[in-house]
Amino acid sequence: MEQTQLTYHEQVNVNNTLRLRELLKTMPGFAKDYFRAIEPTTSTRTRISYAYDIRVFFQFLLDENPMFRNKTMDDITVDVLDMIKPVDIEEYLEYLKVYQSGDHELKTNGERALKRKMVSLRGFYAYYFKREMIRTNPTVLVDMPKIHDKAIIRLDADETASLLDYVEHAGDTLSGQKKAYWEKTKVRDLAILTLLLGTGIRVSECVGLDIQDVDFKNDGIKVVRKGGSEMIVYFGEEVENALLDYLGERKGVSAAAGSENALFLSTQRRRISVKAVENLVKKYARQITTTKKITPHKLRSTYGTSLYQETNDIYLVADVLGHKDVNTTKKHYAAMDDQRRRRAASAVRLREN
């Protein structure tokens, strides 16, 4: 019987499920109940993220809390959660700012990482408290770390044009092996960058595309959003031309087993990875700007900014970017509203000079 090939996202879920099983073996046994309970409402990627966060909490207790001296993960039962006081949670947050992991690597966490770890721990505690397996929930008595908004980093219009021009003509400044590599990857890289800049899709959505996900009749691509929902994202003429050029080249490439349907391939003829796309974005962007740290997500911000400036429709931007909550979009692009309001202050003259 012929076996159906898994899609990229199905394979990611399988790999994540296996990783989570191995991860849970390194945690207290009762934690499995929590991860089994949240499975219907979370993605595999989210559950792995939570598992890493919660494991760090238990490792902190074993390493830093005198109550757990000479104890191991196997000694920790659900009753331990009731022994933790708010001050212990506060000490944990302080510990997270700089600590050594199990392999003695120095780890640091900024505001957003601290908040995410606190969210993970609150959800973990809430599960056992709701089911009356513990009597207390100290996590709700500890304030969430404050997040300070950062300015949106994005490419200006001239920088966007310069980036794409550089990808097309970088060979003029290269020689030898570097030039040969550029010639081999130029059309692919130009297609990837044009697609990211012209649609605002996430890097994970980009690498997950299959050839059959591209519909030139309607100028759209089918992407799998965070959470697993599917959506058609439409593209313009520049994206269409870049994709057609690449697909003309892609037809002549024999993909490695398992990557036959993948739209974008690595030089090893396998589906390109998120890390590879991140590296190529950084490589080209470094030639355009030295003051902005450009990542695929910054290209997404560049698209969102351009779309908002052209349409002034925050709901359209939220829909196209795949934000479930428009407030997420407003938070990112509110500064642009402020700029328009500032211009309004000087637009009306009360008296002629």
Image: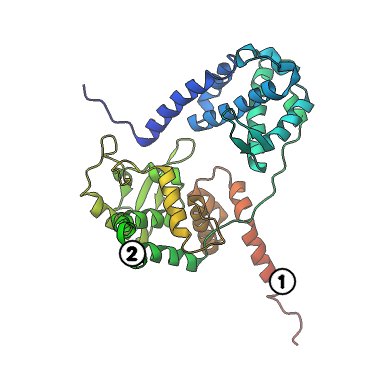
Residue 41 in sight: yes
Which percent across, then down, holds residue 181?
31, 55
Label 2 element class: helix
Q: Is residue 214 above or below residue 158?
A: above
Front-most of 235 and 106?
A: 106
**In this figure, which residue is indicated by the disc labeled 2?**
171
Total residue callouts: 2
Q: How is the image coloured?
A: rainbow
At label 1, which amino acid type do we have? Ala
**In this figure, which residue is indicated by the disc labeled 1?**
345
Q: Is residue 232 above or below residue 257?
A: below
Quadrant for the N terminus in the image: top left
Measuring 67% from the left and 62% from the top, which residue is drawn there? 338
At label 2, which amino acid type do we have? Gly
Q: Quadrant of residue 111?
A: top right
Which percent across, then down, holds residue 83?
75, 17
Label 1 element class: helix
Measuring 28% from the left and 55% from the top, which residue is drawn there? 184
